Amino acid sequence: MKFKIEGNYPALRCTLDRGETMITSSGNMSWMTQGFELETSSRGGLFKGFTRAITGEGMFQNIYRAVNDQQEIVFSASLPGEIVHIEMNGQIIMAQKSAFLASTEYVNFEVALTKKFSAGLMGGEGFVLQKFSGKGDLFLEADGSLIDYQLKHGEVLLVDQGHVFMFDESITYSIETVKGLKNLMFGGEGAFLVKLVGPGKVTLQTMPISTLASQIIPYVPSSN
């Protein structure tokens, strides 16, 4: 499989030979040449399909298999941002719940929950994460631009929930309440922060969908 990512509002263009496959969630495929077979599968059974549905990806995934050489299939980002390629080689990656765009066949997609259910539930964005493992090519989509941090052992980063895009499994993750009643009520930064503790790599996104939506909503006409 060959690929390239192009455009200011990026698209992932993949060229596959006969027998090669791409996996994606329902609705992620933008266009393709005619030499593909489509199979819809829960990939791992109904329970795994159900847990994936918690992230908003749907219970079933689409498997596109090339039946001829040099067939193209294209996946477009759903929001202004970036498409990220990760070469999976046995490592484990944790990502925001809407990150998955597409992958090759042997990349595993699971759901990860925070250790404390109540903390995750109250933290909104932090309750559900996508967890990726296996080997192959993984493509994730981010909101806005990306900034990387390499945290040392014990080094801490406190992040507004929606800005967390991806981090290594070695990173310890939890939800913290903003301290101080006045800060909580008048600070305007939300009630919860994500606490990320090293060692490991953390990737943050600059324009989460929640921020974009809050800027657009005042300009949307209402029935009133």
Image (cartoon, rainbow, N blue to C red):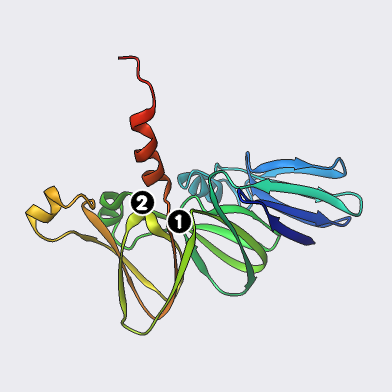
Disc 2 secondary structure class: helix
Percent position of residue 181, x then y = 8, 54
Residue 191 shown left or right of residue 124 in the figure: left
Q: Are marks 1 and 2 in contact (CB under 8 Å)?
A: yes
In the picture of the structure, the residue carrying the numbered disc 2 is: 125
Disc 1 secondary structure class: loop
Percent position of residue 122, x then y = 25, 50
The type of residue carrying mark 2 is Glu
- Mark 2 is surrounded, within 10 Å at the Cα level, by few (under 14), some (14 to 19) or many (20 or more) other residues, namely many
- Seen in the picture, residue 201 relative to 7 is either above or below; the reply is below
What residue is shown at x 21% (from left), y 52% (from top)? 191
- Mark 1 is surrounded, within 10 Å at the Cα level, by few (under 14), some (14 to 19) or many (20 or more) other residues, namely many
- Seen in the picture, residue 186 relative to 34 is either above or below; the reply is below
Percent position of residue 202, x then y = 43, 70
What residue is shown at x 8% (from left), y 53% (from top)? 182
Residue placed most toward the observer, 202 or 118: 202
In the picture of the structure, the residue carrying the numbered disc 1 is: 96
Q: Earlier in the sequence, mark 1 or mark 2?
A: 1
What residue is shown at x 37% (from left), y 29% (from top)? 219
Corner quadrant of residue 171:
bottom left
Residue 44 shown left or right of residue 163 in the figure: right
- Seen in the picture, residue 113 relative to 38 is either above or below; the reply is below
Question: Quarter of the image containing the N terminus?
Answer: bottom right
Question: Quarter of the image containing the C terminus?
Answer: top left
